[in-house]
């Protein structure tokens, strides 16, 4: 039997990388370390180019990037974060823990921003989905994967202060979103202000009976705050906020927005505007209205919250309230990297003001 061989090589950016591969010879069980040089030889490029693609630290042509990524996939190469930590005391990686990536679109766009902005700072990102389950949020914060990380960006939906005593002192964490636990820094945008902006705009555009779609305030901090902002805008306009119309949904996706509008119409609810508590719900509502023969904005005005990229490409283009994700990510990363570096910069709560983006879904033409 062939003797197992192992190789490692210091890359041009100071990183030692390794992975494993099993010999194609069925008589051998040797495991061989995969290095940057192996990837470079297979892709037909320099080691420096491979490093720039892997670490996202350089500007590499798309065709070259594709060749390198194909070689990485074929060889099963991955960076050896443990070796990097042994040399520098840091892993060069942070965690991003979010409830989901595919339902609402919000967290997918957030994750893309975190990865790109972290790469410009020389950091890799390990992403984990929790589905909003408390035990999985706690495992992400306390589990063994944390040993691969220098710090973590965490969007928690169910985590409580009771879950935090076991968190090692000094492990850097910055919270994203509405939920505050422990003394961690937190970066968010003002959900109540966002709903106030959207509601006030709908009223100014001529709405008299606004149907709110989505979110259960019994289980969602976002829904609680956005509903409070909606009612505050109604009260400020002299409308009876106590009678606000709200169709609760357990999910925040397109299908739920469509189903909520269908339920309201089937029940004979009289409304001339819809406020989706996020953009995915609002987009679904537009489809539900169309299915019922109601046009947007001619018959029913529709607005959402979050400022997703896709809202600029719907028919009609959706009025929304921009959550300023690029700014949220920039502030959160700056805070986290300061904590990783041992800085004592003042953090606490950073809450960004939203911005209204008016488009066709609330603009009636004569």
Image: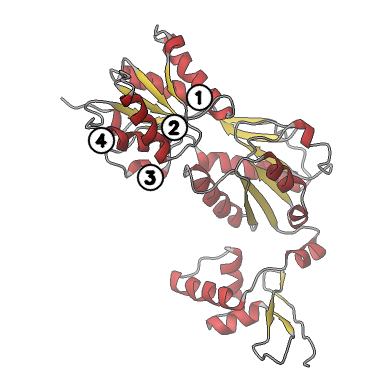
Cβ atoms at labels 2 and 4 below 8 Å apart: no
Tell me the SS state at disc 2.
Answer: loop
Tag 1–tag 3 contact (CB < 8 Å): no
Is the residue marked by circle 1 packed among few (<14), some (14-19), or many (20+) residues within 10 Å? Answer: many
**First reached walking from the N terminus: tag 2 or tag 3:** 2
Q: Secondary structure at mark 4?
A: helix
Of the numbered discs 3 and 4, the one sitting upstream in the chain is 4
Quarter occupied by residue 298? top left
In which quadrant of the rendered image does the C terminus lie? top left
Q: Position of residue 281 (x, y in %)?
A: 41, 35
Residue under numbered circle 4: 290
N-terminal of the pair, mark 2 or mark 4, is: 4
From the top left corner, tell me how far across and down residue 94 is, in percent. 68, 52
Residue at 79 percent of width and 45 percent of height: 171
Within-10-Å neighbours for mark 2: few <14, some 14–19, many 20+? many
Residue 191 percent coordinates (x, y) = 52, 27
Q: Residue at x 44, y 73 (%)?
A: 63
Q: CA distance from mark 2 to mark 3?
A: 12 Å
Mark 2, residue position: 305
The tag on residue 226 is: 1
Q: Of the residues under marks 1 and 4, which one precedes in the sequence?
A: 1
Mark 2 vs mark 4, foreground winner is: 4
Residue labelled with disc 3: 310
Indicate the quadrant where residue 332 lies: top right
Q: Disc 1 versus disc 4: distance between alpha carbons?
A: 26 Å
**Who's the residue at 68% across and 82% down the image?**
22
Image-based side of 100 in relation to 175, left or right = left
SS for dot 1: helix
């Amino acid at each position: 039997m062939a003797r197992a061989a192992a190789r490692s090589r210091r890359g041009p950016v100071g990183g030692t990388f390794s992975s494993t591969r099993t010999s194609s010879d069925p008589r051998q069980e040797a495991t061989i370390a995969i290095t940057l040089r192996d990837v470079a030889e297979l892709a037909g490029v320099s080691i420096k180019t491979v490093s720039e693609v892997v670490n996202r630290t350089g500007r590499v042509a798309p065709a070259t990037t594709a060749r390198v990524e194909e070689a990485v996939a074929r060889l099963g190469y991955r960076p050896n974060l443990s070796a990097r930590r042994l040399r520098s005391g840091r892993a060069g990686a942070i965690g991003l823990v979010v409830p989901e990536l595919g339902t609402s679109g919000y967290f997918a766009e957030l994750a893309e921003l975190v990865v790109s902005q972290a790469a410009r700072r020389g950091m890799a990102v390990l992403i984990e989905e929790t589905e909003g389950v408390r035990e999985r949020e706690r495992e992400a914060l306390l589990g063994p994967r944390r040993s691969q990380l220098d710090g973590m960006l965490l969007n928690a939906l169910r985590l409580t202060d009771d879950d935090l005593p076991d968190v090692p002192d000094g492990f850097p964490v910055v919270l994203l979103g509405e939920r505050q636990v422990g003394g961690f820094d937190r970066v968010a945008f003002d959900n109540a202000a966002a709903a106030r902006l959207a509601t006030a705009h709908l009223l100014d555009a001529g709405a008299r009976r606004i149907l709110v779609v989505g979110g259960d305030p019994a289980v969602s901090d976002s829904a609680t705050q956005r509903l409070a902002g909606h009612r505050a805008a109604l009260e400020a306009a002299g409308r009876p906020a106590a009678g606000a119309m709200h169709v609760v949904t357990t999910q925040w996706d397109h299908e739920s927005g469509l189903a909520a509008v269908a339920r309201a119409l089937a029940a004979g609810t009289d409304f001339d505007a819809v406020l989706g508590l996020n953009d995915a719900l609002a987009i679904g509502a537009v489809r539900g209205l169309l299915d019922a023969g109601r046009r947007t904005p001619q018959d029913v005005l529709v607005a959402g919250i979050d400022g997703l990229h896709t809202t600029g490409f719907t028919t009609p283009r959706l009025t929304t309230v921009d959550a300023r994700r690029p700014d949220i990510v920039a502030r959160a990363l700056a805070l986290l990297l300061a904590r990783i570096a041992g800085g004592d910069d003042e953090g606490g709560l950073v809450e960004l003001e939203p911005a209204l983006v008016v488009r066709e879904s609330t603009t009636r033409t004569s």
